[in-house]
Amino acid sequence: MDTTGLSDAEVFEAWCHAWAVGVLRVLKPGGHLAAFGGTRTWHRMVRGVESTGFEVRDQIAWLYSTMTRLRSSPQLVRVKPEWPHFSRTVEDLELSSIHLSK
């Protein structure tokens, strides 16, 4: 496949399509594929796999906090103090602290 003129993300998607074609060819009828992708590229992987004929039924995401514990204290400490605490609801956040760029 000629990848000139494609972005890195599109090349990755084409690569995922290429290996998914091979997986679909050797997979038994009714078989399943478990594929793992990075946080910024999983959607490209899914598009490449779907384009071969696979049906995406479920996705599992590993979500983790940016919080850490001090060894001497059980209290949580923010890694980035300017970020809102992850357990706050949207209503609890002050709108003045949110800066949107246009």
Image: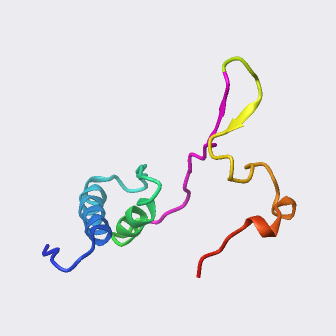
Q: For residue 11, what is the image quadrant?
A: bottom left
In the rendering, at what x and y percent does residue 48 appear?
Answer: 35, 67
Q: Position of residue 50 (x, y in %)?
A: 40, 69
Viewer-proximal residue among 76 and 37 = 76
Is 72 situated left or right of 45 in this image? Answer: right
Judging depth in this view, the residue of 4 and 66 nearest the camera is 66
**Figure label count:** 0
In the image, farthest residue toward the top = 72
Residue 1 lies left or right of residue 89; in this view the side is left
Asked if residue 78 is positioned above or below residue 83 in the image, the reply reads above
- In the image, the segment drawn in magenta is 55-70
22 drawn magenta: no
Q: Position of residue 41 (x, y in %)?
A: 41, 60
Q: Quadrant of residue 18?
A: bottom left
Q: Residue furthest right?
A: 91
Position above or below: 101 against 58: below
Q: Position of residue 45 (x, y in %)?
A: 38, 62
Q: Quadrant of residue 5?
A: bottom left
The colour scheme used to paint the residues is rainbow
Dominant secondary structure, magenta: loop
Of residues 42 and 80, which is closer to you in this image?
80
Asked whether, in this view, residue 89 is left or right of residue 45, the answer is right
Residue at screen point 29% across, 55% down: 23
Locate the N terminus and report the quarter of the image it occupies.
bottom left
Residue most toward the left?
2
Which residue is depicted at the point 27% across and 68% down? 8
> Residue at 81% of width from left, 53% of height from top?
88
State whether residue 92 is above or below residue 3.
above
Task: Look at the image and tell me in which quarter the C terminus lies.
Answer: bottom right
Task: Verify whether residue 60 appears in magenta.
Answer: yes
Q: Nearer the viewer, residue 89 or 14?
A: 89
